[in-house]
Image (spheres, rainbow, N blue to C red):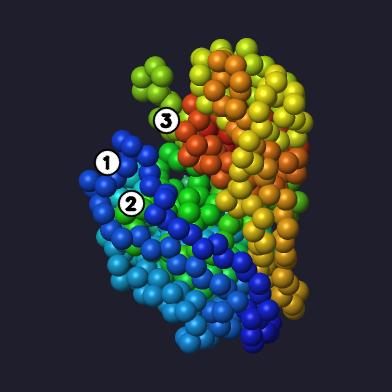
Amino acid sequence: MNIGVPGLLKAHHATCLSITTASLRPHSALASELRSISNMETKTLAVDARNIGTVTATPLEHDVLDELDIQLDSQTIDAQRLQKAAAQLKTSDVPVAFPTETVYGLGADATRSAAVQGIYKAKQRPSDNPLIVHFASLNQLRSLLRGSSSQQSNGAHVNGTPEDPIPEIYRPLISRFWPGPLTIILPNPQNSSLAPEVTAGLQTFGARIPRHILALALIQLADVPVAAPSANASTKPSPTAAEHVAYDLEGRIETIIDGGPCDIGVESTVVDGLSIPPVLLRPGGLSLEQIRIVPGWEATEVAYKNKAETESQPRAPGMKYRHYSPKATVILYEAGRKPPTTDELLQHVGVHARVGIVQTELWTLDDSVSPPAIRKNPQKHPQGNTEYVQKVFGFAGMLLDVQAADRAKPATRKHTIDNDQVKEIITVDLGAKTGDIARGLFSALRDLDRQDVDAIFVEGIDDSESGTAAAIMNRLRKAAEIRVD
Ligand code: TXA
Ligand code: MG
């Protein structure tokens, strides 16, 4: 069955940000270090998915993406840019940044060691942290799993068949959630074409089919599996807009495909169905509850920690945890805690500090600090007011456009305090909706960092019902140097 609609993308209204990277230089010490290592010209190329051509998706049995076909309209600058990026992915050892529905990825040909090493170099990521491999279709994944030998190197609970090498346990899961924010752990076949750097020595690898049309098109055009971690500098918050990538990796990569802000804003959920019972390795855009309703996944256990991992504990007193961390000290108030009083602010940051506050469900400006004297310069949030449309495949014989236009933009307000205690307070209001908080969180941390605040006080949310809230609080607890329980 072919559910493709010729001209599909013509009906898709994606809004692309046009980015000026000149003003987005990394800060001081990091900047000079980065410049000394590398100084490539980094180009941010806006690509409007409406203009790239025709994309046809073909499911065979279930509602999953078995095959993807792309007819580029090579007259358009958008198609040309995408084609060039795909060629670069395929041939260059310098990775290419591209949008996905979760966060921006930094992609390289997963079958070439030099290309994969390029990712670790650009990000300065420790090489013992394995990468997720992105595919454009199930058939592309199946062909990798078949490898050059039908034998599997991993003895653990592997029950793929010659007809379908994807283990049985995953089939109902991926038929529901792919393409989408889900990464599954698979056995790496013997004679695998994956470069060893992808798996960091493990016998398994993480696989995902993303839902973003530009990500799918890029992978399909490159015609290689694409290893891609989040496109931030290691330890920094993940990038949810092209300008975040430019800020972190300017001079270290050549191409950033700008497809506008990411729809979800936190990374994919990582699950391992090879162990019994299945486990959730990283909370993300898909919730535990959504996974547990799938046959075979009812008993899924949580196997992630909410604190920074041991190896990332400070090596010396005063060193920050190195995860999702802006430069500023993050102070996380768990859900239900009252906002900090001026005295509490001063306790944490001392006098004359610049303070950032990220508020979510309950805090309001008025009770967060007493009293903000002068209100000035409402700040425009970089993702704000941007009408954003995400193409989602609806596989019940139709394709649907999910339009997330007019998403309430996080409001940012700056207050100069007219006493000599706290110098300035910049408040970002992410709103009370979990989806909005996920979408705006990393961007808010980055914005505040760019405004050189000394500390960021964050209002945590209730994650007892899990959902995406679990992913949000997981990232915040890792980013936070201080937690107020
Ligand atoms: O949403 C996402 O997943 C984004 C976009 C770009 O797709 N990618 C991303 O990649 O977040 P990265 O590299 O930042 O995170 C990869 C995660 C890590 O938690 C890593 O430990 C886990 O996946 N992972 C990868 N391979 C694994 C394996 N073989 N076994 C267990 N965990 C694995
Ligand atoms: Mg990451």
The answer, for residue 97, to whether it is visible in the render is yes
Asked which secondary structure carries label 3, the reply is helix
Q: Which residue is mark 3?
A: 312
Q: State the separation of the CA atoms marked 3 and 2.
A: 20 Å
Q: Given the image, on which type of amino acid does mark 1 rest?
A: Glu
- Whichever of callouts 3 and 2 sits on the residue coming sooner in the sequence is 2
Mark 2: give few (<14), some (14-19) or many (20+) Cα within 10 Å: many
Q: Is residue 337 visible?
A: no
Left of 145 or right of it: where is 272? right
Question: Residue at coordinates 64% horizontally, 52% vertically from top-left?
Answer: 384
Q: Which mark is residue 33?
A: 1
Relative to 86, 48 lies left or right: right
Q: Nearer the viewer, residue 173 or 407?
A: 407
In the picture of the structure, the residue carrying the numbered disc 2 is 122
Q: Quadrant of residue 55?
A: bottom right
The spot of residue 74 in percent (x, y) is 47, 86
The 10 Å Cα crowd at callout 1, few under 14, some 14 to 19, many 20 or more, is few
* Left or right of 359 in this view: 109: left
Give the mark toward the camera: 1 or 3. 1
Q: Amino acid at mark 2?
A: Ala
Q: Quadrant of the C terminus?
A: top right
What percent of the width, then of the height, locates residue 237?
50, 42
